[in-house]
Image: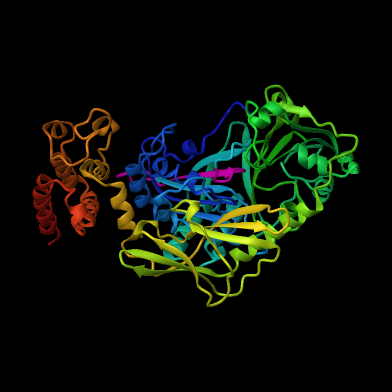
Amino acid sequence: MLNPDARSLYTSAVCPPPGYVFDQAIATTFSLDPAALLSLPTHLALAERPSAAPPDPIKLLESLRRLSDRFSIYVDHTGIKVPSSRNLLYGLLESMVIPVKAPRGGVFHPKIWVLRFIQPDIDDPPLIRLLVLSRNITYDRSWDISLQLEGRPGWRNVAGNGPLVELVQALPSMSVTPLPETREKQAERLAAEIRKTNWELPEGFESVSFHVLGYKRRSWTPPSSSKRMAVISPFLTENALSWLRSFTNEIVAVISRPDELNSLQPDTFQAASAWYTLDEAAETEDGEATDERDTLGLHAKVYVIEKGWWTTLCLGSANATGAALLERKNVEVLAELSGKTSQVGGIEKLLGDNGLGQLLSPYVRAEDGSPAENAEEAAARKALEAAKTSLAQGGLKVICRAEGEAWRLLLTASQEVPLPGISRLRAWPITVSDDRAVVIPALAHSNKVDMGIYATESVTGLIAFELVAEIRSLSLQMVLNLPVEGLPENRDDAVFRLVVNNREGFLRYLLLLLGEYEDTLLGKGSAFNGGDGGGGWSPRFSDEAPILEELARAFSRNPDKLKDVRSVVNRFIKDQKTAAIIPKDFLEVWRVFEEAMQEAAR
């Protein structure tokens, strides 16, 4: 049922299946690391298989271009993390990353992906892939759970998909800033297709339905009068455990984190027959230490319920806490799978040696309980969280002002942003390192804070903030995706020219646009590798990568590819410095195709 030896990679889960290409995708997450997000575009847009090698910048640049209006990531408005390193390509994520607020005041916490794949030149219904996860889009190495379902839209509505359809339709309305109509239409289209999609189920399961918590006061309740239940949740509260206990004869096992179990009142342990944590070796993966609470250890959320001959498996984003299950403020998603226990197994199988049993250790509560959190530290963390929310809701905006060929960035707010308990606030664009951070004295309406002068390619609305508490100097970092007034029109072009910065890069990019990019053509030992890119068209390159033939093939089979080539050429010839990168031989050939394209358009 839940096999810890069956591992799934994010990169594998988003790759198109053989014979298909990516068309559209929507993802939701509570937290987002821009660096982790940058690891995914080549797998989506170019169907690259998972690899330990870092993404090729040219492939990544083209992938971002292809995805910019077809991939939407909805993230809690306080959930964007500060990446560990700078990258100019972060600026190209702005339009895809959409900060949202839970409509009832909690946190936006669902982790789902809806991906649409099509077969070129085949008029069949699209393939819809749904991922229901407990994992955020981060580099966390925690123990999470994922469900992958696929299906094709049919003719009839599927009742169990209704709550999921409503959530996808509602996502644009949760955005903290107005969205373009294209994002709304994307959500409507994918929701309409989900409504009619019958999912292929995991072996042994006979039905699936979905529950969305925290939207339109929707909630989830377990099947009532069940015989047994098991709960896997990294975070717990007494009231939620008591509520779950009311639906079943017995909670056989609760699996959680040691610190969460330590925080429970002694009487709470009467709610379940057995309590477990992950074995220390499993928690830390070979004994690695970490200071980040959510980096390693248990992060899966699963409810296993036995009733009669049936086992029901509920999994997704909802912890066994009052905020998730009872208050109906957090937006959460759970998938509910049901099958005969004889086919899918039950709690015994879950806890057995072929299930999670091999990773579990019985929880033993210390006699004196866990030490209470220091009052000062608790006050500092509370101040940081309050300030984080205040910043996110302050109506902040970035204003760009030209300074020669560079740009001065000013930070302003639509209202006063109170930050009680905070001794220092710093800010910087995530496209540069934090040594460029400036101290922000105050944020209020009409108060413009000078963030410094930046090159065109570094301008972005993705602004990192560091807050330091007055008490014990505890700190917190976050990123806000802010509206930008006066964004340089040539910002994307400037980023493009920095990545594709020599003739080798230009020719590699052309091959990628024409669909013939191969590392074997332009990798080690190629005619351009290791040089400064200043050479012409060598005989070796002409033999290995015949651009003329590829242009001709694209003209006859897929003229839209030549429109992309035209866009790239025009980007380069705008600037004298970059115009020199284009080989003269290519320009002579390209003029012929330009004339042919104009003739064909008449």
Q: Is residue 348 positioned above or below 241 on the image? A: above
* Location of residue 153 with respect to 469 vertically, above or below: above
Position in image of residue 322 (x %, y %) = 77, 53
In depth, the one of 129 and 478 nearer the eye is 478
The stretch in magenta equals 118-138
Quadrant that contains the N terminus: top right
Residue 260 in the image, given as x and y percentages of width and height:
77, 42
Asked whether 410 falls inside the magenta stretch, the response is no
Q: Answer with left or right where residue 38 lies relative to residue 394.
A: left
Residue at image point 27% right, 31% down: 523
Principal secondary structure, stretch drawn in magenta = loop
Above or below, comparing residue 72 to residue 248 in the picture: below
Location of residue 362 in the rendering, given as x and y in whole percent from the top left corner: 80, 28
Q: Nearer the viewer, residue 225 or 220?
A: 220
- Find out whether residue 130 is within the magenta segment: yes
Residue 461 position, x and y percent, is: 46, 61
Residue 349 appears in the figure: no
Q: Is residue 585 left or right of residue 531?
A: left
- Inspect this view and state whether residue 36 appears: yes
Q: Quadrant of residue 420?
A: bottom right
Q: Which quarter of the figure is the C terminus placed in?
A: bottom left
The image quadrant that residue 346 belongs to is top right
Is 405 rendered above or below residue 592? below
